[in-house]
Amino acid sequence: MAVLPMWKCDRDSSMFDNKKEADAYDKMLELGEQFSLLLEKVIPQVDEKAAEEFGLVLARNKELVLQACKGRPEAIAEIFKEKESGNVTKLKAS
């Protein structure tokens, strides 16, 4: 029997084949959590689940968000297109 190394994310129990992917996923979840907390502080009446989903959308699409912040606001429209098609960028969990 072979032994396979696996990495488990303690935030949501996602499993990964390598440490690099696990670390990247964990960092994405941490960023999403911080975006969620920011949204809840700025708009206290926002639903916690909605804030969490919004935070994860921003974190999963951080490159597009960065492009928008650097003067290319149309990059946000790419997130809308992906969301509508059901292909929102996600880091792969095994």
Image (cartoon, rainbow, N blue to C red):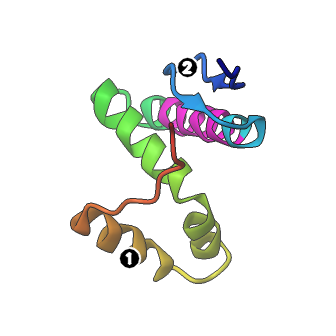
Who's the residue at 68% across and 25% down the image?
A: 4
- Quadrant (top left, top right, bottom left, bottom right) of the N terminus: top right
Name the residue beneath numbered marker 1: 77
| Magenta stretch holds residue 29 | yes
Q: Nearer the viewer, residue 2 or 37?
A: 2
Residue 45 visible in the shown view: no
Count all numbered tags in the image, as a single digit: 2
Left or right: residue 64 compared with residue 46 = right
* Mark 1, other Cα within 10 Å: few <14 / some 14–19 / many ≥20: few
| Circle 1 or circle 2, nearest the eye | 2
Amino acid type, residue under disc 2 in the picture: Arg
Left or right: residue 20 compared with residue 69 = right
Q: Position of residue 83 (x, y in %)?
A: 30, 62
SS for dot 2: loop
- Quadrant in the rendering for residue 28: top right
Q: Earlier in the sequence, mark 1 or mark 2?
A: 2
Amino acid type, residue under disc 1 in the picture: Ala
Left or right: residue 45 compared with residue 29 = left
- Quadrant in the rendering for residue 70: bottom right
Who's the residue at 54% across and 38% down the image?
A: 32
SS for dot 1: helix
| Magenta stretch holds residue 71 | no
Which contiguous range is marked in magenta? 24-38
Q: Nearer the viewer, residue 59 or 10?
A: 10
Who's the residue at 48% across and 34% down the image?
A: 36
Name the residue beneath numbered marker 2: 11
Q: Position of residue 80 (x, y in %)?
A: 32, 69
Q: In the rendered structure, are the residues bearing label 1 and label 2 in contact, judged by CB atoms less than 8 Å apart?
A: no
Residue 77 visible in the shown view: yes
User: Looking at this rendering, what residue extends furthest in the right direction?
Assistant: 20
Main secondary-structure element of the magenta-colored stretch: helix
Left or right: residue 52 compared with residue 47 = right
